[in-house]
Image (cartoon, rainbow, N blue to C red):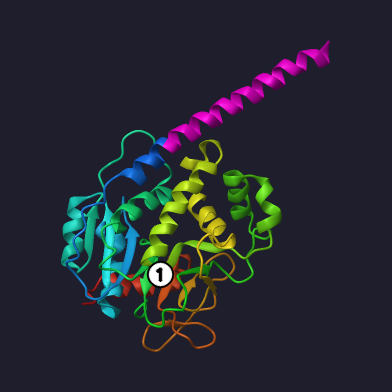
Amino acid sequence: MRKIAKRPRKYISSLVRGVREHLWRSKYAEWRDSQLSAPALDVTLRHGIGRNLVLGAAMGYGLPVLLPFVRSLRRFSDCRAILVVDDNAVARQLDLEGIDAVIAAPGTGFTPNLNFARAGLLHRTLLDLEREIDWVFFLDTRDVVFQADPFTGTPPADIVFFKESAGSTFRTAPRNRKWLIGTFGERWLPMLEDQELLCGGTVLARYEAAVLLCKLKLLLGTMVRDERHAAPGVDQMTTNIIARLGLIPRCTIMPHDQLVATLSGANRDFLLPTAEGFFKNRSGRLPAIIHQYDRVPEIQAAIHQRYALHRAR
């Protein structure tokens, strides 16, 4: 009798899980379709020159948080730059700093975690720029600073992903392993377990590949399990899936300490200060971009002093 009684409970539990997952995926599908079918955001390139674009999402941030990003960029590059924001006052302040801004209207109904939802906003930002932009550098904004022109020496590829750290894999990085299992399920572990982690906050791509990257992320979101859409890690996991499965042709992967230096995990001590106040890697190269600089208090303090407290332009 006990065995017979357990079966209905297991069946009901499985049924509830199935219904819940269907509802979450339906909500996501509705949001995804709204992003893919929505018109382009209103974009006017007023600042910068040329056909290279730095593009990032900065919703929820005030100008002080963004000053190291915008002022260091303008110190070293006159490229185009667009930040997607949700505050008109911040947009006006960015204009004074030589950065174009796009206003993202607040969403209604279901919206995924912001780090992933930005794929829809960035896609809509790019739609009308095909005739104006050749290269796009997708970048986080809160924890990125520039030390040189990020488009110098662009590699011969359509899209460039950057390793998050040296030797860090899904096998050795518990948080990312948890994100992968929670986002796409354990069936992906055998394929990706020993692959080095790639960063979701720094991607360089030709215009066509940049648009494709955004679309692929939105489509891959359909595979995400349950309420994981609203949790962190989905953006990072979709980046790794796209790169490791070769979903975008002519892809290349760069180390964590060259063009982009990412301070992540145990790899936080490979940058050395110079007499001029910059930070070089151990081989003497000056990375054009430092990502997650706030992970090292000494580097963060030096950057904040230079860009947050004094005008760099």
- 223 is within the stretch colored magenta: no
Residue 143, placed above or below residue 88: below
Magenta span of residues: 1-29
> Does 275 appear above or below 170?
below
Q: Hey, what amino acid is under mark 1?
A: Gln
The reply, left or right, for residue 215 in relation to residue 62 is right
Report if residue 11 lies within the magenta region.
Answer: yes
**Quarter the N terminus occupies:** top right
Vertical comparison of 10 with 190: above or below: above
Q: Is residue 225 left or right of residue 115?
A: right
Front-lying residue, 56 or 67: 56
The image shows residue 248 at horizontal and vertical percentages of 50, 62
Please state which of residues 81 and 263 is positioned toward the viewer in this rendering: 81
Instruction: Kindly identify the residue that appears in the image at 39 percent across and 82 percent down.
Output: 278
The reply to whether residue 118 is in sight is: yes
User: For the stretch drawn in magenta, what is the main secondary structure?
Assistant: helix
Which is more toward the observer, 86 or 130?
A: 130
Q: Residue furthest top?
A: 1
Residue drawn 54% across the image and 53% down it: 237
| Tag count | 1
Q: Give percent across and percent down for residue 236.
A: 51, 55
Residue 55 picture quarter: bottom left
The structure residue drawn at horizontal position 63% and vertical position 53%, both measured from the top left corner, is: 177
| Residue density around tag 1, few if under 14, some if 14–19, many if 20 or more, within 10 Å | some
Q: Which residue is mark 1?
A: 300
Residue 111 visible from this viewpoint: no
**Quadrant of the image for the C terminus?**
bottom left
SS at mark 1 in the image: helix
| Whole-percent x, y for residue 137 in the image | 38, 68
**Hey, which quadrant is residue 196 in on the image?**
bottom right
Query: Which residue is pictured at 22% across the width and 50% down the height?
Result: 87
Residue 195 position within the rendered picture, expressed as x and y whole percent measured from the top left: 65, 63
